[in-house]
Amino acid sequence: MAFVVPSSYSKSYLSLPHPRISSTKQVSFGIAAGSVFRQPCLKLSIFSGGKTLSKGTNAAISDTPLLGTIDVLDAFEDDYGGIVVNSTSLPNTSNAFSSSLQSSLCYWNKQGKRGVWLKIQEDQADLVPIAIKAGFVYHHAEPGYVMLTFWLPDGPPGLPSTSLHQIGVGAFVMNDKNEVLVVKEGKCPSHCSDIWKIPTGFVDKFEDLFSGAIREVREETGIESCFLDVVAFRHAHQVLFDKSDILFICTLKPLSSDISIDESEIEAARWMPVEEFVSQPFHQEDEMSRAITDICISAHHKCYAGLAAHQVMSMLDNRVAYLYTGDTREATGMCPRDYKS
């Protein structure tokens, strides 16, 4: 988006029509004839009598009138005083992108904006080094794009970090014969090889916890099941890719009994008597495994109440989501009779 800047005085005014940010904005903008913004351009100077009115300028100083053109990247404001660049309308050439990026940073800084989010698609990956050189930093990457950020104000960045956790599920399935559905991993570290364990796996993108547990059981064993509750979760740090990890332990009720394994994921699966399952040496020696199993068995025998999934609407983000809750004290008979909500 190009804007013509007439300058017959030391202070010129730039009228910036923008369909997303606003219809028209008037901004005091000082430009020096023949000047080039150095990287990164963190401050915007206003000139008066050849003197800089703001410190830390990255533009040359001149009182020479000029007629120049400033390119500002197409972008929109987020809800937190930041800028999100439209990734579908980035300049096609490196030179044009570099020039527009520097001009945009100066303009947004003058507007008092905070963080800048720049999403670069895979087919424009050659623009990434240019943005990094301008002062952007990596935030996260997904198949098809990389997200970069730039913090305009002085001081430490205030943008949220990328995802810090991986979410997994473990599925405890026990039938009416007191048999536990267990699997033996086909590929796993040597210290956990040849161990019968409950089905586990990562939750897919946009997948609910209970759906992930049902899917993992189906994919690994062919058993159809229905979700009962979340009975516990394990929180660990510096796991895969140095991320923190949360594993939600779910109990499920089997709806079928014939096992059909996915040989690409596991080596074997079976219905194992619970006594045999808990008597495994690994289970006896591993405190975490023993605690999880004891809780799941207690839940199966109605001696432990977990968290059930309830679909709830929130006005804060206008979304329907699942809230996992347990029984109230009133429902369990533990609530004082004179209690009022």
Image: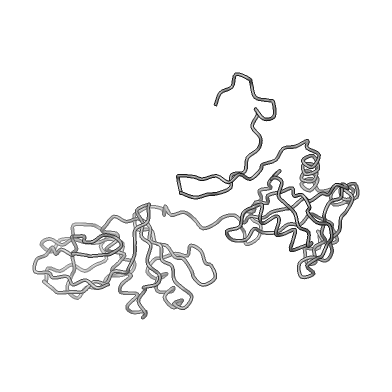
Is residue 229 depicted above or below 334 in this figure? below
As drawn, is 10 to the left or to the right of 135?
Answer: left
Foreground residue among 269 and 103: 269
Q: In which quadrant of the rendered view does residue 191 lie? A: bottom right
x, y percent for residue 61: 18, 67
- Quarter of the picture holding the C terminus: top right
Q: Point out the image quarter for the N terminus.
A: bottom left
Residue at the image position 78 percent from the left and 37 percent from the top = 302
Position of residue 231 measured from the top left corner of the image (x, y, whole percent): 71, 43
Q: Position of residue 154 (x, y in %)?
A: 34, 54
Q: Which residue is rendered at x = 75% and y = 49% of the image?
A: 252
Q: Residue furthest top?
A: 338
The x, y position of residue 337, in whole percent, is 63, 20
| Residue 195 falls in image quadrant | bottom right
Q: Find the residue positioned furthest to the front.
A: 255
Foreground residue, 208 or 56? 208
